[in-house]
Image (cartoon, coloured by chain):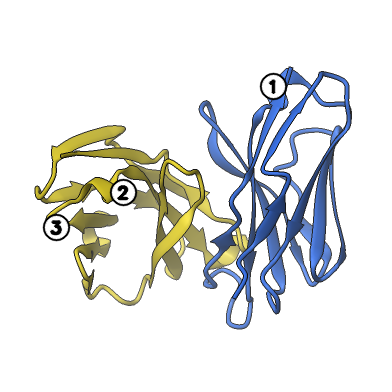
Chain colours: A blue, B yellow
Amino acid sequence: DAGVIQSPRHEVTEMGQEVTLRCKPISGHDYLFWYRQTMMRGLELLIYFNNNVPIDDSGMPEDRFSAKMPNASFSTLKIQPSEPRDSAVYFCASASGTLNPSTDTQYFGPGTRLTVL
Amino acid sequence: AQKVTQAQTEISVVEKEDVTLDCVYETRDTTYYLFWYKQPPSGELVFLIRRNSFDEQNEISGRYSWNFQKSTSSFNFTITASQVVDSAVYFCALSETTSGSRLTFGEGTQLTVNP
């Protein structure tokens, strides 16, 4: 079975440019999460969706960040305009949510390494 | 507020040694879940185990074992007879039922197994 798929795996862009990260969750999973990993802050949750609806976006750093989930098999995280401090690894994860969402295991994608020059 | 502490930033061992990675957590919930993830040099996050707060039985999976003690709020991870392929960053994480699906991660422990 395919796991969580993320694209691109690596992205290098210049400050001020728009960046779009993409995620395809595991089929049948109702929950999708976006995390960011940096040396300074570790792994932090940015936003998560349940059945394509954003539930908690309190971790989104600022208005430059936006996330959408137009359908059950696709989500995007957009940064516009990008800044050097956005450089990080961005992970997408999904969970089935069949029991309690707090209990279900989150399975992570391979991540997108973003570098903003 | 939930918090996870992994006091060991880096551990270095020689192959075949046993190694224990510590994890201490804080929570006000009576129902919560604890996880361990492995992040090898390739960068992906690999799920290892999930435990709920009502199950304090230790668990063993091959060379991996986990010791959950509510009395000390700890969920330690032991690798027996370590191998070079075990070299990775290991993360402990906590999920409270009252905080939705939020996973709070510890800072991670970098384990290096030398041949």
Question: Do the residues indicated by labels 1 and 2 lie within the same chain of the protein?
Answer: no
Q: Nearer the viewer, mark 1 or mark 2?
A: 1
3D distance between C-alphas at marks 1 and 2: 30 Å
Residue A95 % position (x, y): 62, 69
Q: Residues within 10 Å of mark 3 (few under 14, many from 20)?
A: some
* Amino acid type for the residue under numbered disc 1: Arg
SS at mark 2 in the image: strand
The earlier-in-sequence mark between 3 and 2 is 2
Q: Name the residue tied to disc 1.
A: A85
Q: Nearer the viewer, mark 3 or mark 2?
A: 3
- Which quadrant of the structure image shows residue B77? bottom left
Question: Do the residues indicated by labels 1 and 3 lie within the same chain of the protein?
Answer: no
Q: From the viewer's perspective, is residue A117 above or below residue B78?
A: above
Identify the mark at residue B80; answer none if there is no mark: 3
Q: Residue at x 60, y 60 (%)?
A: B99
Residue A21 % position (x, y): 78, 45
Most foreground residue, B109 or A101: B109
Q: Residue at x 51, y 28 (%)?
A: A39
- Which quadrant of the structure image shows residue B98? bottom right
Identify the mark at residue B24; answer none if there is no mark: 2
Q: Residues within 10 Å of mark 2 (few under 14, many from 20)?
A: many
Residue A93 % position (x, y): 63, 59
3D distance between C-alphas at marks 3 and 2: 21 Å
* Amino acid type for the residue under numbered disc 3: Thr
Residue B22, can we see it?
no
SS at mark 3 in the image: loop
